[in-house]
Image (spheres, rainbow, N blue to C red):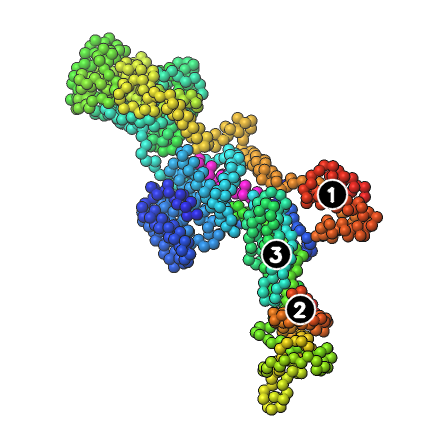
Amino acid sequence: MALKLRLPVWRSRRVPAELGPVTLSQSRIYVLPTRAGVLFGATALVMLIGCINYNLGLGYVLTFLMSALAIVSMLHTFRNLVRLQLSPGRPEPVFAGDQGLFPLLLSDPGTVIRRSIGLAAANREASFVDVAVGETATVEVRIPAERRGRLRLGPVRVFTTYPLGLFQAWSSLELDMHCLVYPRPEPGHIPLPAPCAGDATGVESGRGQDDFSGLRPYQHGDSLRHVAWKAAARAEPLMTKQFTGLAAGELWLEWDTMPVDFGLEARLSRLTRWVLEASHGGHAYGLRLPSIVIAVGSGPAHQSRCLTALAVFQQ
Amino acid sequence: MLGVLIAVLAPHVIRIPVWVSAAVGAMLVSRGWLAWRGAALPGKWLLIPLTVLGTGGVVLTYGPGLGRDAAVALLAIMLGLKVLEVKFLRDATVAVCLGFFLIITNFLYSQTIPTALFMVVVMAWLTATLVALQDRNHTLAASQALGTAATLMLQAAPLTVALFLLFPRVQGPIFGFPQATSTGVTGLSDRMSPGSLSRLGLSDEVAFRVRFSSQAPAPHGLYWRGPVLWDFDGRTWTTGDTATTATGGVHHEGSSDVVRYTVTLEPHNMRWVFAIDLPTAAPPNTVLTDDYQLLSTRPVRNRLRYDVSSQLAYRYGLDEQPGLLRRALLIPRGYNPKSLELARQIRQQSSSEEDVVKNALDVFRSQPFFYTLVPPELGRDAVDEFLFVTRRGFCEHYASSFVFLMRAAGVPARVVVGYQGGELNPLGDYMIVRQSEAHAWAEVWLSKQGWVRVDPTATVSPARIQAGIAAAVPAGEPLPISVRGNWQLLNRFRFTWDAMANFWNQWVLGYTPERQTKLLTDAGFRAPSWQTLAVLLMSVAGVVVGVLALLVLRKLLLVRPDPAVRVWGAFCRKLARRGTRKRPGEGPLDFARRAAAEQPALEPKISAIADLYIGARYAGRRDKGEARRLRQLVSSL
């Protein structure tokens, strides 16, 4: 049960990420004075010298009380962290460019209230939380999600300087948590491709004619089937016919229909935008990628599936 | 936090110049106002000139050099500036540390018990401030922060006591800054005129406290020797010059009359060090003069504790220098003619010097003399008026007139001023001598006996010598109530308070290296060096911290896991050996179902175990029978 103070060990080897709840045992926790603690100690030392010089009996009492207080606070700071249990939460997916949110659940197996526990991913700003007895507190660790795919949490530093700020107890742990990062949707309002009539072969069946609702300027990537050729032949700018209602058509978001000069990420970006727009508009849609085809569907689960496929494409 | 800083600075307000208090107050208040309004803090363009102004002002007020008051003023200004600058947590700690420093500067002025209590309160407040600063989410109420601070301080108390007793004490000063003089202390001066001692009779301040290691003498033997006054100008007696080596030689009449005691002398700005007639040797840092005054090498400005022993039955001065004897006969011409005549008559009647003394004392005995704290004023011929007209006086009148008569009759005599008597404090087993016990008596030189003490007051008012001033002075006179000692309750309170103050002086303020060494030798260490101290301190501190750690951490590190959990762990391990491994994060129900599917033979047992475990762990069923059944089932696997 010995109280351990250790100098930080430089870890050169990769520690494998831990699954499941982690309890901070005493051997994982380091305790060192903070800068404020060093200042406090220096003040006490100067006061001690003053006491010796001026023979201040009461000054000795004060100085020793300060030192004893610092030592006691070290015990309390250690207690604030030891046996704290951290469990992974369920990170919600985010879009590239946003902050990945990793909820961590902190709880205490005993009867100790913990205050001002700080959590920070590598070198980022810390969030602080109090853990009451018997309750679970949630802290969201934020990491910027720059690229799409699976964002790993990486090492997280749990620390506290409560109650007096003279000592810091900390521990480093790595929970195996991943956050799904969807590709960044293309900015601006990209209109959806027109739905294809009929089945995948595109044969015009003539059933269920859509209602012609108007023309709009041709967008790079619109299906050529829907271009108003007659108007183009009249030397007018290229326009695309728009139809309302999808009674006979299925909306397919297709990889192949992208302009050839679009790179991989650009294509994914536009597809993401389309998926969002389609979901937002309440349409049913399908996704066709080189590696995967997702049948037409609608609803939040379908959206998740599509976005996930886009996120992990060729990862 | 501003509140605590104001509390820390408050006691100093009376000691530092007004402009400093005003400036610091303004800084603190403006900081509070800025915080309340949420405005930005002043930048460096304001703070740097303020710093320069403040420092310059302090230097101007106090001159160069860092005395006590100047240091305090400077600290106060620094604190104000720091508070204005504080933006981040880190800087706030600096302000708190400055606050601690200011508390200790208090002790440069006063170290009494009330000051100590104030220190504890302010320290608790400062600690609570630190706690509140650490509360990042602002969930802590002020009372909770204070409670935490109080708990921390209580837990720190044993370690504080250990450190206080065992930390190696070093005798200062280290860098020799002169301590500022304590002002306004009462005490004896180096001259005596009618009224000077009766003024002291009005004061109940403690002059010194005595602890006797041998038997305390009877009250009539308790003459505390102070200044010896040789020169008389008709009204005032002065010490004049005295050599600082005792030459008369003291003969001791047997060792049974030796008294050993320790005196704790309150500061009084003069050099007198008091001991019972006659001290046998000079304590460290003091010298014994020709006329057996005990003088400290430097004026007593701090509480002084010294051991001394005195010889009650003595004989000294048999071969006194003739020059001194002539000096002890000098009286001013043209003063007090009637007393001169009386002295001549006494001389004629007496056959020897001892007779002269006896006859002179008879004068006081036969005539109606009164002992009073408020004697009438005396004019030019003070002795004449006292002896023949007023006949009402305090000890200084009696001593002065007696010595005058002696000198006029040809017997060398001198006045000795000091204290007489003392009050035993039953609660602390020591004696208190107050300023009101100030006394003056005479010493005459007899050719066969040397210097002999004669106390004319004893003739007039024996009660004064036997029972102290309270018994001697009539009831209507302005003696302080506490000295009178009439009320039982007040007496008890007085004694208790004084015993506490004495303990405080001896053990907290007067814990010198010598006392520390004495403590260790009493505890059994033979020759404690500072290495012994260091080792002892480490081990005691280690034990204290260990006990503390146990106390603080017992809830966490001695937690015994739920026995049901242990049994479940065994169950999972047994199943894992059979090939069904529980996945992390898999709940007991899911796992049981999956295990039952994978190990159909064990299905009934598995379900039963799962049921019991879930009941014990989650439904709170604490039936011992069930727990036993659970264990049996698992061990039967």
Secondary structure that dominates the magenta span? helix
**Host chain of mark 3:** A
Instruction: Sort mark 2 into few (<14), some (14-19) or many (20+) by Cα contacts within 10 Å.
Output: some
**Host chain of mark 2:** A
Secondary structure, mark 3, is strand
For label 1, the residue is B612
- For the question of whether residue A46 can be seen, the reply is no
Instruction: Sort mark 1 into few (<14), some (14-19) or many (20+) by Cα contacts within 10 Å.
Output: many
Amino acid type of the residue that numbered disc 1 sits on in the rendered structure: Leu
Question: In the rendered image of this protein, does residue B197 appear above or below residue A280?
Answer: above
At 43% from the left and 28% from the top, the residue drawn is B500
The verdict on residue B326 being magenta is no
Calculate the distance from the C-alpha at mark 2 to the C-alpha at mark 1: 45 Å
At 57% from the left and 47% from the top, the residue drawn is A132
At 67% from the left and 40% from the top, the residue drawn is B560
Q: Position of residue B520 (x, y in %)?
A: 53, 29
Secondary structure, mark 1, is helix
Q: Which mark is residue A103?
A: 3
Q: Quadrant of residue A236?
A: bottom right
Secondary structure, mark 2, is loop
Mark 3 or mark 2, whichever is nearer to me:
2
Q: In the image, which residues are magenta?
A: A55-75
Q: Are marks 3 and 1 on the same chain?
A: no
Q: Position of residue B440 (x, y in %)?
A: 29, 21
